[in-house]
Image: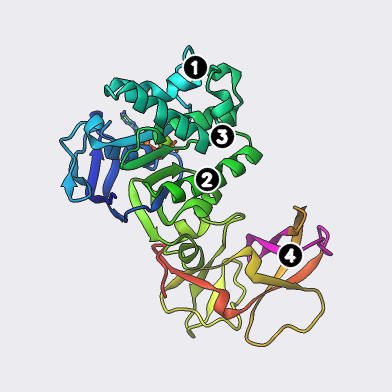
Amino acid sequence: MATVTLNDVRKVYPGGVEAVKSVSIAIPDKALCVLVGPSGCGKSTLLRMIAGLESITAGTVSIDDRVVNAIGPTERDIAMVFQNYALYPHMKVYDNMAYGLRNRGTPKDEIDRRVRETAEKLELTPLLERRPRELSGGQRQRVAMGRAIVRNPKVFLFDEPLSNLDAKLRGQMRIEIKSLQRSLGVTSVYVTHDQLEAMTLADLLVVMNAGRVEQVGDPLDIYEKPASTFVASFIGAPPMNLLPVTRGEGGGFSFADGSAVDAAEGHKDAATFGFRPEDADVAFDEDVPSGALTLAAEVEAVEPVGADSFLYCAAAGSQIVVRVAGRAKARPGDQLRVIVRPEKLHWFDGSGKRTD
Ligand SMILES: Nc1ncnc2c1ncn2[C@@H]1O[C@H](COP(=O)(O)OP(=O)(O)OP(=O)(O)O)[C@@H](O)[C@H]1O
Ligand SMILES: [Mg+2]
């Protein structure tokens, strides 16, 4: 069992770049924690500090109740899986998996037992005699996982392990990693910039932005109640529609193009309101339900993706996207009304923070 606790962790690189600016996260035992955020937000830096590959400028990293800041990577009992697999090209799969155990002086028969057991779990048994270049991308990734698992570490760390794979294989490997992590019950930290991967894998999702944590929680809670406009636009694809609003004299709100926001009770400090593409309905001539927010919109593009279609529209001086089921009836140039029920609206203040 292992918990991983970050307490006010900070990283300033020698050149002066402040890559991580005070991050606190408590990762429970057996959890799969995903760090997600745009390129350069400090994900890998944070992971490398947990691994012991990078020094910690301030704050503490603890595994269970032990502060590990001053403990070397090999003594932390952690295994890391990288994007580029880092397999030894001249070694067979078997030897790649056995390498770490041999280095630790594990007895030969125990190495053999553990490698074969792990290979069985990962369906690598028929491939043990091959070299990495004789494997597909997915198989190589599985060997990299096997090499981590075979050591039976306290914690797994993954840094974008699937980013070299094509979309279909990524999807498959995602499911494999999730079920493997569940069945092994090893506390894991997984870094990705792919929000879908993050949503589907995480028990605990950490959204990062510019060296800070924007929000931590259950992935669906974050999706349903993003704490900021940053999170609202980063989690979900297409992202949440965000429309700037201003508060008038009478207390009502108006959009960027001057049109009034009707039938939506705003929050006092609201500067932006948002709604998810799937939370809007479109109407051509029909009556609009009373109490709902309506926007006059012109369709600019229609993107059919099979089960749904995305309508890209100009509305209230902004571009918005609406998701409709099946084939869209609308065509570019059509005028329609976009209807959002008030309970589906998200309100944010001038600094981008959620106001409810
Ligand atoms: N060794 C280093 N020396 C100086 N600055 C660094 C070093 N490594 C990373 N940085 C800087 O620290 C910041 C965070 O980098 P980091 O690699 O942690 O980002 P990331 O979130 O993993 O990004 P990506 O999604 O592109 O992998 C970036 O501004 C980066 O340029
Ligand atoms: Mg990185």
Label for residue 194? Answer: 2
For the question of whether residue 175 can be seen, the reply is yes
Mark 1 surroundings: few (<14), some (14-19) or many (≥20) residues within 10 A = some
Residue bearing the label numbered 3? 123
Residue bearing the label numbered 4? 324
Q: Is residue 103 left or right of residue 280?
A: left
In magenta, the rendered stretch is 310-333
- Residue drawn at x 37%, y 39% is 157
Residue farthest toward the bottom in the current orientation of the protein: 290
Residue bearing the label numbered 1? 92
Q: Earlier in the sequence, mark 2 or mark 4?
A: 2
Point out residue 252 in the picture as x, y percentages from the top left corner.
52, 82
Mark 2 surroundings: few (<14), some (14-19) or many (≥20) residues within 10 A = some
Camera-side mark, 3 or 2: 3
Name which residue type carries label 1: Lys
- Which secondary structure, mark 4? strand
Residue 327 is a magenta residue = yes
Q: Are marks 2 and 1 in contact (CB under 8 Å)?
A: no
- Residue drawn at x 79%, y 68% is 335
Q: Earlier in the sequence, mark 4 or mark 3?
A: 3
Point out residue 273 in the picture as x, y percentages from the top left corner.
52, 69
In 3D space, how far apart are the residues under numbered discs 3 and 1 (Cα atoms)?
A: 16 Å
Name which residue type carries label 2: Asp
Q: Earlier in the sequence, mark 3 or mark 1?
A: 1
Q: Earlier in the sequence, mark 1 or mark 4?
A: 1
Q: As rendered, which of 172 and 9 lies closer to the eye?
A: 172
